[in-house]
Image (tube, rainbow, N blue to C red):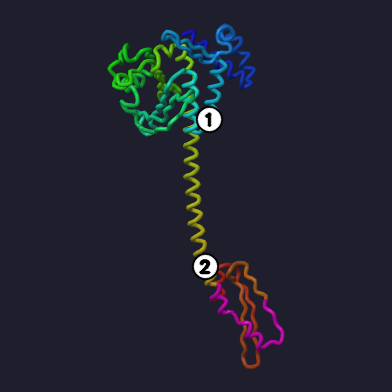
Amino acid sequence: KADFAQMYIFRAYKLYEIWGANTKVEYMQQEYEMYIQQSLSQTQSTLTHSTFEHSTTNNSQTSSIDVETVMDAAKTISQEIVLTSLFEKILTIIIEHACAEKGILLLQDSTDSSKYILEAEGVLIQNKVEVTHKNEMPTEHSLPMSVMRYVIRTQQSILLNNACSEGNFIRDEYIRKNKSKSLVVIPILHQSKLNGLLYLENNQTTNVFNEHKIGILSLLCMQAAISIENARLYNSLEIKVAERTREVVEQKEIIEFKNKEITDSIQYAKQIQAAILPQKSTFAQHFADYFVLYKPKDIVSGDFYWFQTFDNIKVLAVADCTGHGVPSGYMSML
């Protein structure tokens, strides 16, 4: 598939060029010179100064896209890591570039790989794409489910130029009800694994989409798949960080509560210890001048002093129990 190979090679070449990987760029210029020169020639001759240009004449539409514009779009998608914002950028860029009226993004359910969740829907209203976040299961009323199931099964894009009057899906409930004309469904693949589906439609005219446009959209879907995976990892990391933070806060509160209980108990022990020490009023009765310097390292102390009188004999003792804190406090009381 030389045409697709050329497209992928040229895209890789331009991305390496943007990244400043000069050695890789030089290697590709030598290894894939023919493909790159063909792409450059086509870009200069037929794709210069063009984005997706849409015009309708006699029910036919022509469109072209500047390769640089596609790469800018892919770069814009790659820079977003917040899921909701990423969905909006993907649908806005693709709907505008593909000349679609509506686009829907379905992603594989993280808990059940057989299910696909309708994450977001973009609708073109007065030349502006308005994106609505859904997060719901798709139904026959929201999508042509027979077409979606076909793409899920085959993992191949499907293009219908006039869905309501030709092709294998004219009996689909959604297509019959909406008289669908141009529609395309593209699988979103990441590492050869189906991660989701992109659905686009334009019911104003037929033949809006073509194989060339599907190739370009597939490239954007490849970048979208990578960005979605990165955004999910980032979102998962944020959730884990929030959980860990909550756990740390809870543990901190438990520790603070227990610490308060322990400290309150020790403060009460200090009062008991102070009660058995000689009162300063006792010293005042027996000494004209005195001082007491008592500074426990912790709240309670292993050191203590004692005073007693026997007839005319005054006995004053200062004792040191080895250590400090609660154990030594108990020793001093004993």
Residue 313: name its quadrant.
Answer: bottom right
Q: Residues within 10 Å of mark 1 (few under 14, many from 20)?
A: some
> Which residue has dot 1 on it?
80
Q: Residues within 10 Å of mark 2 (few under 14, many from 20)?
A: few
> Is residue 290 found left or right of 331 in the rendered image?
right
Q: Residue at x 59, y 71 (%)?
A: 302
Give residue 287's mark.
none
> Which residue has dot 2 on it?
264
Q: Residue at x 39, y 33 (%)?
A: 135
> Is residue 13 found left or right of 253 in the rendered image?
right
324 or 300: nearer the viewer: 300
Q: Looking at the image, is 120 positioned above or below residue 97?
A: below
Q: Position of residue 257 (x, y in %)?
A: 49, 60
Question: Which stretch is magenta?
Answer: 270-292
Q: Which SS class for mark 1?
A: loop
Identify the amino acid type marked 2: Asp
> Is residue 189 found left or right of 317 in the rendered image?
left
- Tag in front: 2 or 1: 1
Q: Position of residue 222 (x, y in %)?
A: 48, 21
Precedes in sequence: disc 2 or disc 1: 1
37 or 290: nearer the viewer: 37
Q: Position of residue 81 (x, y in %)?
A: 52, 32
